[in-house]
Amino acid sequence: MSPRTSKQYKEIREEKITLIMETALKHFANEGYYSTTINHIARHAGISKGLMYNYFESKESLLKAIMHKSIAEVLNYFDIDRDGYLSEDEFEFFIRKINLILKEKRSFWRLLFQLLMQNDVRAQFLKSFAGNDSGEEPETLPGPDLPVSQIMNIISDYFIRRKDRMGPGYDPDIELKMFLITMKGYALTSIYQDDEDENSEKALNRIIEIYK
Amino acid sequence: MSPRTSKQYKEIREEKITLIMETALKHFANEGYYSTTINHIARHAGISKGLMYNYFESKESLLKAIMHKSIAEVLNYFDIDRDGYLSEDEFEFFIRKINLILKEKRSFWRLLFQLLMQNDVRAQFLKSFAGNDSGEEPETLPGPDLPVSQIMNIISDYFIRRKDRMGPGYDPDIELKMFLITMKGYALTSIYQDDEDENSEKALNRIIEIYK
Amino acid sequence: MSPRTSKQYKEIREEKITLIMETALKHFANEGYYSTTINHIARHAGISKGLMYNYFESKESLLKAIMHKSIAEVLNYFDIDRDGYLSEDEFEFFIRKINLILKEKRSFWRLLFQLLMQNDVRAQFLKSFAGNDSGEEPETLPGPDLPVSQIMNIISDYFIRRKDRMGPGYDPDIELKMFLITMKGYALTSIYQDDEDENSEKALNRIIEIYK
Amino acid sequence: MSPRTSKQYKEIREEKITLIMETALKHFANEGYYSTTINHIARHAGISKGLMYNYFESKESLLKAIMHKSIAEVLNYFDIDRDGYLSEDEFEFFIRKINLILKEKRSFWRLLFQLLMQNDVRAQFLKSFAGNDSGEEPETLPGPDLPVSQIMNIISDYFIRRKDRMGPGYDPDIELKMFLITMKGYALTSIYQDDEDENSEKALNRIIEIYK
DNA sequence: GATGAATGAGTATTCATTCAT
DNA sequence: CATGAATGAATACTCATTCAT
C-alpha cells in the first residue's frame, strides 16, 4: 500500500492521455467532431467524463492536442532535417511513405480533411502556414512553426529540377499542381476506402511512374 | 381586401423556399451543418425561425431537400439521356462541364464532401447507389433512382474503348481509377480555392490532355 | 351580383360559427384541448386559421364559447322553469333524459370531464356555482348564473320526500350521495363507451329501480 | 478526495429519481400533463432541468415511468397471487382496500383518469389488457403483463356465485355492471374531493351493504 | 368575409463543463 | 488521480396569434 512513486503517476498520466486522445481521434474521425460527445468518448475510453477534464481543458483543446500530436508524428515521419534535396529515388520513397502514412494514420487524415472543410477552421490553419503561395495543402492547426512549407519547397524544387529530364513544353508549376491534385485525390480515395484494393497499389505505381 | 389568389400564395411560398434553401446551403457549406443554427439561417435569410418550419419539417429535412434539389440539378446538367457513348470530344466536353458545375455549385459540393466524411451519412449515400463496384463517387441521399452508376458505366466504357488508341500495357481499370482520383483531387482543390487561378485552367487542360 | 344583404351575412356568420364550434368540440373532446391545434381545427372545418380569429378572440375563448353553449343546451333540455317538485315519474323521466343527453352530447361531456380534471379549471367552475354544499357536480365554466344548484335542490328535495316511502334507517343524505356517485359512474361509463351495449340499458333500468 | 462509492452514487440516483417522479406526478395530476412544463417540475423539485434528462429520456418517458411504477404499486397492493376465490368478507375487504388506495394514491388516479380521457392514450391502454370483454377498467400503459383481467375475473366470479344468495331475478351481469359503475363513480368522487367527508365513509358502507 | 404567410414567445432537449466527494 | 451527479447556456422545434392582401 505504499504510495505510487511520481514516476508511476507520470506513467499513468501519459497512458490515460494517450488513451483519451486515441479514442477521441477515432470517434472524431468517424462520427464527426460535433456529433461526438464527451460522454461518448469517455464511455468508449472506459474512463469518466471528469477525468478527461483533468487532462484537457476543453473539447476543443483536446482536438487541438490531437492535431498537434498527429501532425508532429506525420512530420517526424518524413525526417525533414535533411539537405532539402530530393533525388528521383527519394521522390519515389517519399510517395510510398505518404501512402503508408495515409493508411497508418487514417483517422487523423479523415479528421484533418473534415476540419479543413469548415471555413473558420481552415482559415486558422492557413494562418499557421505562410509561404504557401497558392493556399495548397494547408496542413495544420495552431501548430507550432511546422515545416510544411519546407516540404512544399523541396517538392517544388524537385519539379523544377525535373525540367532538365523532361522535354520542352514542360511546365514545373503545372506539373507540381497536377501532382498535388493527384495526391489529394489519392489521399481522399485512400482514407475513405474500407477494404484494401489491389488497384490502389497499381494506381500508386502509376503516380510514381508519371511524376518520378 | 380580398385574399391573395392561390397562385400568388404559391409564388410567395416558392420564393421563400428558394431563399431559405439557398441561404442554408451557403451556411451549411461554409460553417458546417452542425455549426449552422436555424437562427443563423433565419437571420441571414431575413425571416423568422418559425417560417422555416412552415416549409421544412426539421433542420435535417431542410438538408435533405437541399441535397435532393442540388443533386437533381447536377444530374440534369449532364443530360444523361444520351446514347451512352462518349466520343473523345464528348469526353473533353464532359470534363469541362464538370469544371463549370464545380464552380457554379461550389457550395453544394462543399456540403456534399463534408457530409460524405461522416460514416453514417456516407453509408446512407452508398446504399442509394448500387452498381458502383469500388464505392467510388457515391453521390446522393435517399434520392430517387439516380443515374450515377450510369455515368460511371459510360466513363468506364470510354476508358475500355480507349485501349485501342493507346499502346500495349494500357490498363483500362487503372486508367479509370487514375482519372477518378485526379478528378476528385481537382474537385477538392477547386471548391476550396477562394480566388480563381490561371494554373487551375492549365491543370484542367492537362487533365484533358492526359485522359482524352 | 348584388351585394349580400346583412341578413345573408348574418346567416353566413352563424353557420361558420356553428361549424367552427362543432369541429372544435369534437376534436377537443377526442384529442384533448391542449393537443388540438388551431390549425387542426381549421383544416377539419375546411376554413382558414385566420377566419377562426374573426369569430373567436382566442383558443381559450373558443373553448369558453363552446362550454357556454353546450351547458345552455343541456340546461335548456331540462326545462328548469317548473314548479320545483319532482314526482316519482318525473324522477324516472329525469334520469332517462340524462341518459339521452349523455349520448347526444357525448363530446361535450367528454370535454367537460376532461377540463374538470385540471385543478385551476375546476376551481373556476366551482366558483361559478354556489349553493353546492358538498362540491358535488360542479358543472360549468365562467357561465352566467346557471341553475345547477336549483336542479340539485330539486333532487335533494326528492330524496328527502322519499323518506316517507322508504323504511326507517333511510338516510336522505346518503341516498342522495349514492345516487350522485352512481350517476357519475354511469355517465363516465356511458360517454367512453364506443359501442352501444344492451347491458347499459339494463343498468339504467336498475338505477331507476333503486332510486325511484 | 476519493470518489463516492458506486453504492453512494446509486443511492443519490434513486433518491433523485424518486424525487423527480413524485414531483412530476403531483403536478401532472393537478395541472395536467401538457400544462406542466419540465421547468416547472425541475423548479419544484429543486433541481435543474438538465438533471431530469440524466434520468429520463424525455417528458413522455418520465410519464411512462411514473405510470409503470404506480400501476405496479397498486397491483402489488392487491396481492393478486391468491386462490382466485373471493369470499363475502374478502369482498368487503377488497372494497375497503380500493378505498384506501384511492386516497393514498390520489395523484396517480387523477393522472390515470386524465390520461384515459384522451382517445389515443386510452386506445394504447386498452390494447395492454386483453380478456376484458367490456373494455371496463383499462388500467395501464405499455405495462408488463398486468393481471387486471384476472382481478376482473375474480370479481365476475364473485357476482356469479352471489346468485345463490340472492333471490330470483338476480342477473350477475347487471349486478357486476352496476358495481363497476358505482365504484367508478365513487372513485371519481373520492379523488377529486379535497376535504375528507363523513358521508363518503357512509357511502362506502352503503356500497358494501348493497353488493356484498 | 377570408386567406395563409409570418412572427416570436415558449418548450423540450442536448451537452460541454464544473465540482463535491 | 477518479467519479459521475449537477448545471445552464444554447438549440431545435411548436403553435397561438397577427396582418397584409
Image (cartoon, coloured by chain):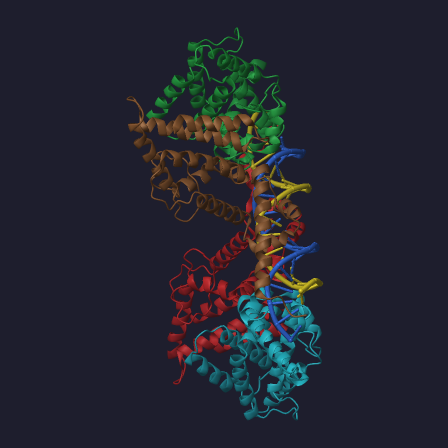
Chain colours: A cyan, B red, C green, D brown, E yellow, F blue
Residue at the spot 55% in from the left edge and 14% down from the top edge: C153
Locate residue A48: give its quadrant.
bottom right
Residue at the spot 52% in from the left edge and 67% down from the top edge: B96
Report the number of discs: 0
Seen in the picture, residue A76 relative to D171 is either above or below; the reply is below
> Which residue is nearer to you in this view: A110 or A90?
A110
| Residue that lies at the very extreme toward the top in this rendered image | C83
> Which residue is nearer to you in this view: B143 or D127?
D127
Q: Position of residue C72 (x, y in %)?
A: 54, 17
Q: Is residue D20 left or right of residue D187?
A: right
Q: Position of residue D83 (x, y in %)?
A: 33, 44
Let me know if residue A138 appears in the view: no
Locate residue C129: give its quadrant.
top right
Let me know if residue B54 appears in the view: yes
Seen in the picture, residue A114 relative to A177 is either above or below; the reply is above
> Which residue is nearer to you in this view: D127 or A208?
D127
Residue at the spot 51% in from the left edge and 72% down from the top edge: B183
Residue at the spot 59% in from the left edge and 37% down from the top edge: D31
Q: Position of residue D130 (x, y in %)?
A: 35, 42
